[in-house]
Image (cartoon, helix red, strand yellow):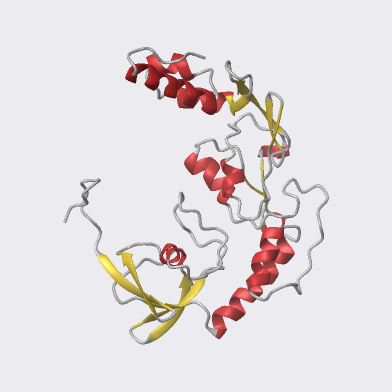
Amino acid sequence: MMHKESGRPAKKQVTVTINGKKCPAEEGEILLGVAIREKIAIPHLCFEPSLDPYGACRLCMVEVVKRGRKEMTTSCTLRAAEGLEIVTDTPEIVKYRNILFELYLAEAPKSEILKAMAARYGVTKTRFLKKLEAADTLDNKCILCGLCVRACNEIMGAGAIGFVNRGPYTLVGTPYGEPTKDCFGCGACVKVCPTNAVEMEDTGDTRIMKSWNGTKVPLSKCDCCGEFFAPKGLATAALARVIPSLKEEIAVLCPACRGKRIAQEEIRALSGGAGHHG
């Protein structure tokens, strides 16, 4: 059977059971994604649809029933198959999850997102203590899930940040703890961070990656409205993929002005060149 839009073979439809509820899914689909779609709550921090799941945070652990036997596994690495049964809140799962929440509250004590998530599952304090680091560029909010590192490497191909040190001294940062020239200033790291640990700020013609030791990235200026909008290096890389005739027209415009220009061109084309200018 072929998919009507893509022309590719359609994936087999299966039924999985989550907490007793029968849920439709595509064979091989990520179970956590199925649960999210069905509005079945499973806590998670390291799941990002644009990246392959790898079960780093372990919060999405569920119990799987296979041939009468039960085992625990991460739902972000579990794939849908016909007849698969999982339970999300057994006493063992709850106990395991609560300990993880306590550990994360100690690891990232200033993350309000993490505190709110833990509180929804009844965890409001931790038995584990960690000294706040005044010099932490991630403001004591990082849980070392690695999403920012993976986004920088696997999606953007920049490799501007990575894991530094080992064991309890592990952290995420730039090489040698200094500003890096490899950063595009794209903000992918900010977008994927589940605890709001990564911060950036646009000031005038510069984007400052505050979490990456103040790395500064120059911004492009729109010739139409005068606003600074995109990192120059990123804009140049994106425009390299655009056809030359169109590139010259939109290279110096921000997205808003670019949209207006395209709309005006469409109006002029539809009205035989009689559209308004400006």
At a point 66% along the width and 69% down the height, the residue shown is 118
Residue 45 picture location, percent across and down: 57, 60
Residue 257 picture location, percent across and down: 53, 23
Q: Is residue 276 left or right of residue 66?
A: right
At a point 40% along the width and 22% down the height, the residue shown is 242
Residue sitting nearer the eye, 74 or 112: 112
At a point 60% along the width and 27% down the height, the residue shown is 229
The quarter of the image holding the N terminus is bottom left
Q: Is residue 154 left or right of residue 161?
A: left
Asked where in the image residue 205 lies, by quadrant, the reply is: top right
Q: Is residue 151 left or right of residue 204?
A: left
Q: Residue lying at the far left in this picture: please name it.
A: 1
In the depicted structure, whether residue 249 falls above or below residue 172: above
Q: Is residue 25 left or right of residue 115?
A: left
Q: Residue lying at the far bottom in this picture: please name it.
A: 68
In the depicted structure, whether residue 104 falls above or below residue 84: above
Asked where in the image residue 188 lies, by quadrant, the reply is: top right
